[in-house]
Amino acid sequence: EQINKGKYEHYMQKEIHEQPESLTTTMRGRLIRGGSCKAKSVLLGGLKDHLKTIRRSRRIVFIGCGTSYNAALAARPILEELSGIPVTMEIASDLLDRQGPIYREDTAVFVSQSGETADTLQALEYALENGALCVGITNTVGSAIARNTHCGVHINAGCEIGVASTKAYTSQIVVMAMLALAIGDDTISSQARRGAIIDGLFDLPSKVKEVLKLDQEMKDLAKLLIAEQSLLVFGRGYNYATALEGALKVKEVALMHSEGILAGEMKHGPLALVDETLPIVVIATRDACFSKQQSVIQQLHARKGRLIVMCTKGDAASVCVGGSSRIIEVPRVEDCLQPVINIVPLQLLAYHLTVLRGYNVDQPRNLAKSVTTQ
Ligand code: G6P
């Protein structure tokens, strides 16, 4: 596997830019286009003997840390929609701290790029002891999590070197969207929706290529934000995870305080922070939450918030209040896949902020690629 930086200056930069290819590899051989007699569907070989058991489970529990947790959060809504099974989220260390209930009727899905994170691995042992069906989603063939789960899916994103995860995040979301499609595969009522998502998956690499063209725009934005102390990122629905992950990227590599905020909670605290100086990214791309996000923008604007709005291409006029916001326009994809597109400008922003601030982008201080001790 080629692990040099090629034409790029840093691994993180290379890994952000290779997402059209890594996503293609993630999906290779797993999507069936359908035809006259065949429905569009997905094929996840590592799960085929266990899908019936997963469909019968009482609950699906996602377990992970850091970026892997955020990827699972991004996939949660589509998994709930297509499976009809309650999906709960667990940060591995918190599950262990609480010794939270895990049952034999649960499917526990362990998400980990490295497959070696100590907390996730220990949570796996705990779930196995409690009799759950354990599924691994990792980027590392032969890793501890891949070996010790009952079944799983490799994300095949290729080797990731930068400590801050980028291409693994988008591949993880795509694998979990495919997992949702596979679980929901026997439901006639959602066939059209599943077909639209599969079409969306086929188109995704080219849309990611398109959004990567925002590189210079994100560099310009980074120049404006270089001396800031803090950055808030508001999202909701499918893009609550984008807000958390965007903020995590900025925090991890640019060493700037950043917080991802669930926009629905704005009035319960975050609104007190809003003034003319604090930069706020609002994710307001088209989906069922769009009008709610328009109202969030208006409320932030009424408090003189310094807004940077991410919207769907062509929507600038619908999200721009008083002409004072900065706009990031992204291509539209099927709503549940939009987090894959929306994270890319924020990855680029975090990257450029870090380089401009003079920090080590591939090995941020105090952090490790894989945390193998507790
Ligand atoms: C570390 C890395 C993060 C990663 C997290 C979980 O904190 O710096 O980039 O998201 O571990 O790692 P995993 O390998 O389990 O996905």
Image: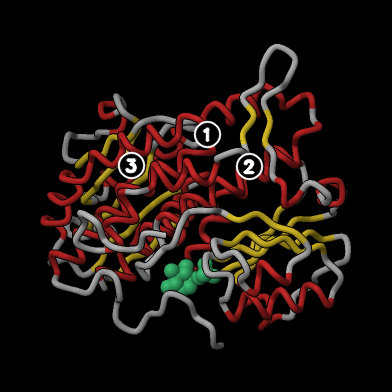
Report which residue position mark 3 lands on. Answer: 297
In the foreground, 204 or 155: 155
Which residue extends farthest top? 36
Q: Position of residue 198 (x, y in %)?
A: 59, 30
Percent of width and height locating residue 164: 37, 67
Where is the C terminus found, in terms of image quarters?
bottom right
Which of 130 and 29 lies nearest the eye of the viewer?
29
Kindly indicate whether the residue at mark 2 contacts the one at mark 1 (C-beta within 8 angstroms): yes
Secondary element under disc 2, as helix, strand or loop, is helix
Mark 3 sits near ligand 1, with its Cβ under 8 Å away? no
Comparing 340 with 271, the one in front is 340
Amino acid type, callout 2: Met
Residue drawn at x 82%, y 51% as measured from the top left: 50
Residue 178 bears which disc, if any?
Answer: 2
Q: Mark 1 vs mark 3: which is more N-terminal?
A: 1
Please determine whether, in this image, residue 230 is positioned above or below residue 56.
below
Counting residues from the start of the chain, the first of labels 1 and 2 encountered is: 2
What residue appears at the point 58 percent right and 25 percent down from the top-left corner?
Answer: 196
**Do callouts 2 and 3 mark residues in contact (Cβ within 8 Å)?**
no
Residue 333 horizontal side relative to residue 132, left or right: left
Residue of label 1: 201
Label 1 to label 2, Cα distance in Å?
9 Å
